[in-house]
Image (cartoon, rainbow, N blue to C red):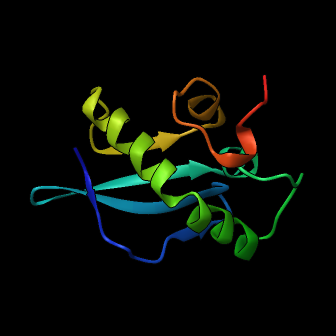
């Protein structure tokens, strides 16, 4: 299981991913969430970096839980969260509830 500090995540415009860090004992594990995955947690089609950070903060526990599960399943060094992680997870963001 990863532990998370409440650091401020960073959005990378080039990669279109938001980065946050998980801790495994003394190792820092880079976790990234795609813009598409962030937007899947909202009712909007597009967002600027500030809005994406707000979406992340509103769903932080969800993304931390998915990152922990992916890491426990064997992801090493870094974890990348894509939209399909949300669509196929038993954990759902509020905006995803009821979607097929």
Q: Residue at (49%, 50%) from the top-left corner?
A: 63
Q: Is residue 39 left or right of residue 2?
A: right
Where is residue 3 shown, x and y percent of the image? 24, 57
Q: Which residue is more in the foreground, 61 or 27?
A: 61
Q: Is residue 41 left or right of residue 25?
A: right
Q: Is residue 44 left or right of residue 56?
A: right
Quarter occupied by the C terminus: top right
Q: Which residue is more in the foreground, 72 or 19?
A: 72
Above or below residue 74? Residue 54 is below
Above or below residue 75? Residue 46 is below
Where is residue 22 shown, x and y percent of the image? 30, 57
Above or below residue 87? Residue 62 is below
- How many marks do you count on the picture? 0
Above or below residue 7? Residue 32 is above
Where is residue 72 shown, x and y percent of the image? 26, 33
Where is residue 14 shown, x and y percent of the image? 67, 60
Q: Residue at (89%, 51%) from the top-left corner?
A: 45
Q: Residue at (48%, 42%) from the top-left corner?
A: 80
Looking at the rendering, which quadrant does residue 17 occupy?
Answer: bottom right
Q: Is residue 26 left or right of residue 81?
A: left
Q: Which residue is more in the foreground, 44 or 21?
A: 44
Residue placed furthest toward the right:
45
Q: Residue at (22%, 43%) from the top-left corner?
A: 1
């Amino acid at each position: 299981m990863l532990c998370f500090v409440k650091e401020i995540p960073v959005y990378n415009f080039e990669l279109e991913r938001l980065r946050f860090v998980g801790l495994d004992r003394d190792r820092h594990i880079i976790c990234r969430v795609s813009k598409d995955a962030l937007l899947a947690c909202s009712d909007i089609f597009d967002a600027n970096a500030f809005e994406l950070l707000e979406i992340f903060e509103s769903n932080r526990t969800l993304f931390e839980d998915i990152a922990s599960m992916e890491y426990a399943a064997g992801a090493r060094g870094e974890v990348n969260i894509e939209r399909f992680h949300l669509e196929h997870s038993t954990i759902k963001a509020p905006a995803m509830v009821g979607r097929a």
